[in-house]
Image (cartoon, rainbow, N blue to C red):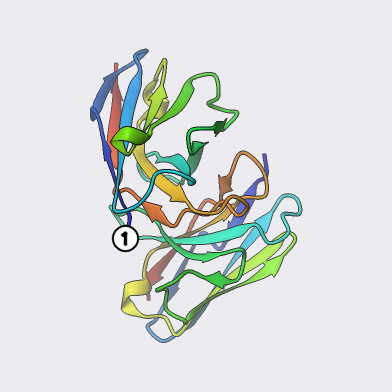
Amino acid sequence: DIQMTQSPSSLSASVGDRVTITCRASQRISDYLNWYQQKPGKAPDLLIYAASTLQSGVPSRFSGSGSGTDFTLTISGLQPEDFATYYCQQTYSIPRTFGQGTKVEIK
Amino acid sequence: QVELQESGPGLVKSSETLSLTCTVSGGSIRNYYWSWIRQPPGKGLEWIGYMYDTESTNYNPSLKTRVTISVDTSKHQFSLKLTSVTAADTAVYFCARDPSASRGYFDSWGQGILVTVSS
């Protein structure tokens, strides 16, 4: 299985901050990398697929980059509704695996 | 706008079979990949497996011997069966749609259903 490791596991930030979350794959996965946002008690929402393609309806302050083994999710100008847990997911091979999550909390 | 809704028992006894159904509305069930994903309380996400249309399945090797996913196109539903459950199978179970044959991302999710395995 491909292991996905996110860092940090949690972070505290203020409204308006620029936030970067990193996801590292245990082997090369090209750009088969997706990002999701999950709020408590809710299903995850797709933010970005194919490493950098913004899902329809997702605000442009979210962006993704990377290829191979190292990927980043950036939130440019954190908004109150962005406080949540973020997961990366690889779909390069079966089983499709997720990172352990990064919880973004209010400072 | 496609909507997905999970249904099934919220409590299953240890060693028995967990059976859940996902009803798809507002969109076609044909020509998509349909997945089940689970999340133990307070923990991360685990992909269980998918079925493509009515043609093929692929399962997480860690669960493969116990999992069956099937589709009933006439009812716009797909189902999950997980046999010989233990407390480790207690989780919120989500169904999700994957619109891409090549990319494998989940663009629509059900709200999730908590299934507790009791001894």
Provide residue A34's location: percent of width, then percent of height: 56, 60
Quadrant that contains the N terminus of chain A: top right
Image vertical order of residue B7 relative to residue B1, above or below: above
Residue in the picture at 37% in, 43% down: B94
Image vertical order of residue B79 relative to residue A45, above or below: above
| Residue kind at label 1, given as amino acid type | Gln
- Badge 1 marks a residue whose secondary structure is loop
| Left-right relation of A28 to B70 | right
Residue in the picture at 41% in, 15% down: B84
Nearest the camera: B117 or A53?
Answer: A53
Provide residue A66's location: percent of width, then percent of height: 68, 69
Provide residue B10's location: percent of width, then percent of height: 23, 30
Nearest the camera: A16 or B66?
Answer: B66
Q: How many numbered callouts? A: 1
Q: Looking at the rendering, which quadrant does residue A97 occupy?
A: top right
Quadrant that contains the C terminus of chain A: bottom left
Chain letter behind tag 1: B
Nearest the camera: B76 or A7?
Answer: B76
Q: Residue farthest to the top?
A: B15
Residue at numbered disc 1: B1
Residue in the picture at 55% in, 24% down: B64
Nearest the camera: A73 or B37?
Answer: B37
Provide residue B20's location: percent of width, then percent of height: 32, 30
Say few, some or many: other residues with alpha carbon within 10 Å of mark 1 (under 14 / 14 to 19 / 20 or more).
Answer: few
